[in-house]
Amino acid sequence: MSRLSSRLALGLVLLCLSTTSHAGLFDGLQQTLSALSASLAQTRAAFQATMARFEAAMAETADRLAGRYLEPTTGTVSFEETLVHQGIGRNALYIRPQAEPAALAPAVIFLHFGRGTPKAMANLIHAGDLAAYDGAWVILPAAENRRWNEDPESDNGIDDVGYLAALIADAVARHPIDPKRIYLAGMSNGGFMTARFACERPQLIAAAAQVVATMRKSQDAVCAPAAAVPMTLILGTNDVLVNYNARYGLLSAAQTFARWQKTNDCDPSGVLDDAIPDIARDGTTTVLSHNEVCNSGAAVQLYTVDNGGHTWPEGAYQDSKLRLGRTSHDFSATAAIWDFFKDYSRP
């Protein structure tokens, strides 16, 4: 019996040791699984965060390519408004100073290039800086089908002159904008539209600017504004789309400069030429020709960007040499235009 008892006792001891060992192993496995689960949760969360950032970046890229993304500018507020004209709801992007103006503010309307969008135009010209640092409201309307009807011989049924006039009236009625200090500028297709509006509704704007745009011969034939409009022109000598020396029914840069001087009753002998300091190694140089000897009080000036392409000086381009020609970085077209505009106000 003693031998049997000893064996039973030994068996109980071994069973206890075995149970304790398995319990320890189980606890170890539980701890390992818990740690693995926590690690997997962290990895999943990190992956989801990475995917969210990737998707946001892809969405931003798609919006940039489609002209739907607006670069944010500190000190500004942006919003969009819709105006119905000819039964069509048309959007305009507004960029205004964040601070409420103490008095009525000036406003600059920028017309985008052909196939462009208001946001793409705003990014290109650094429109937010004009609102943030100079206190101007910036209005960027959208052309129907992304192209302005700027040729007076066109019969596509889109009344862009009437639309822009309605936009100005609506903006003044809704916002603290000074009706005497509304200015108009445009690039390319938008620049030609600027010329048409200056010819047909000069009483609504205090000054205007055309960038990489001259005047159509069809516009020249009918342009008889009831009031003079101070005008700035900015053109490149190597522009393959709007040839500096005239092509395809357009006046040359020199002819357009002379046309606006004649319209504004300027003395042709009053033209002065000033070289813009060549501060950037961009392959361009610029000469400013200007005439302030005008009986109307409306000066005319022309920036000739030698070797410049179909570009906005100091514009936000990434591939300008490949697609549009050289961009001047010796001066900012936006700053030059505002410097010209701010001295003018309608009576």
Image (cartoon, grey):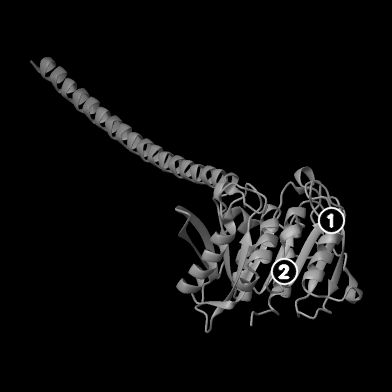
Decide: few, some or many residues near mark 2? Use Cα within 10 Å; few <14, some 14-19, many ≥20: many
Disc number at residue 113?
A: none
In the image, residue 222 above or below residue 336: above
Give the total of numbered labels: 2
Q: Quadrant of residue 263?
A: bottom right
Secondary structure found at label 1: loop
Indicate the position of residue 219 as horizontal and vertical percent values: 72, 57
Instruction: Specify the amino acid type for callout 2.
Output: Ile
Q: Nearer the viewer, residue 233 or 281?
A: 233
Q: Can residue 77 be seen in the rendering of this structure?
A: yes
Above or below residue 330? Residue 177 is below
- Residue 269 screen position, x and y as percent: 92, 75
Is 17 on the left or on the right of 298, as rendered?
left
Q: Measured from the top left, where is residue 235 in percent x and y? A: 80, 58
CA gap, disc 1 to disc 2?
A: 21 Å
Query: Quarter of the image containing the C terminus?
Result: bottom right
State the residue in front, 149 or 9. Answer: 149
The residue under label 1 is which amino acid type?
Ser
Residue drawn at x 15%, y 23% as measured from the top left: 9
Choose between 120 and 153: the one closer to the eye: 153
For label 1, the residue is 252
- Provide the residue designation for mark 2: 337
Residue at horizontal 77 percent and vertical 57 percent from the top: 214
Quadrant in which the N terminus appears: top left
Compare marks 1 and 2 and give the one earlier in the sequence: 1
Q: Is residue 72 visible?
A: no
